[in-house]
Image: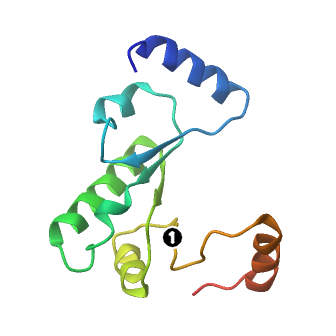
Amino acid sequence: MDSTERVIEALRSLRDHGVRIAIDDFGTGFSSLSYLKHLPINKIKIDRSFVREVDSDHRDAAIIKGVVFMASMLGLDVVVEGVETASQYAHLGRLHCETFQGFYFARPMPIEAVVAFLEEHQGRVE
């Protein structure tokens, strides 16, 4: 992100055309809190590294809870990546997480299988 201003303008242009923008793997690598103030984003995806031990490590839980609260205050949606167990899912729900991604829900599959999966599970909340 050497040319931050050019990136911001490009993202604004995309957003103006209806493209929704997410920061992936939030909390690791180059994701910075300062970007949240300037980038025209809609969503952050909390990295799976914070989810692995969320039900046994209070520090991971605290980080996730803080990110969810901060995102809410900034008007951003949050996706929690890497949910693999019912215990993680339940714990994340108690931390006010609402959108999840991970093997607990389904493994990667071809589009035909996705359509069948969605038809079979439509309206079901587990």
Q: Residue at x 16, y 71 (%)?
A: 58
Q: Residue at x 79, y 65 (%)?
A: 111
Helix, strand or loop at disc 1? loop
Q: Tell whether 8 sits left or right of 17.
A: left
- Say which of 15 and 101 sits in front: 101
Instruction: Check disc 1: other Cα within 10 Å, few if <14, some if 14-19, many if 20+.
Output: some
Q: Tell whether 64 sits left or right of 42.
A: left
Quarter of the picture containing the N terminus is top left
- Say which of 79 and 94 sits in front: 79
In the displayed structure, 99 sits above or below 43; it is below
Q: Position of residue 117 (x, y in %)?
A: 75, 79
Count numbered badges in the picture.
1
Q: Position of residue 72 (x, y in %)?
A: 41, 51
Q: Tell whether 29 sits left or right of 10.
A: left
Q: Residue at x 32, y 35 (%)?
A: 30
* Image quarter of residue 106: bottom right
* Image quarter of residue 15: top right
Q: Position of residue 100 (x, y in %)?
A: 51, 67
Name the amino acid, label 1.
Gly
- Say which of 32 and 1 sits in front: 1
Q: Which residue is mark 1?
A: 102
In the displayed structure, 55 sits above or below 102; it is below
**Colouring scheme applied when the structure was drawn:** rainbow
Quarter of the picture containing the C terminus is bottom right
Q: Residue at x 45, y 12 (%)?
A: 5
Q: Position of residue 79 (x, y in %)?
A: 48, 58
Q: Tell whether 3 sits left or right of 56.
A: right
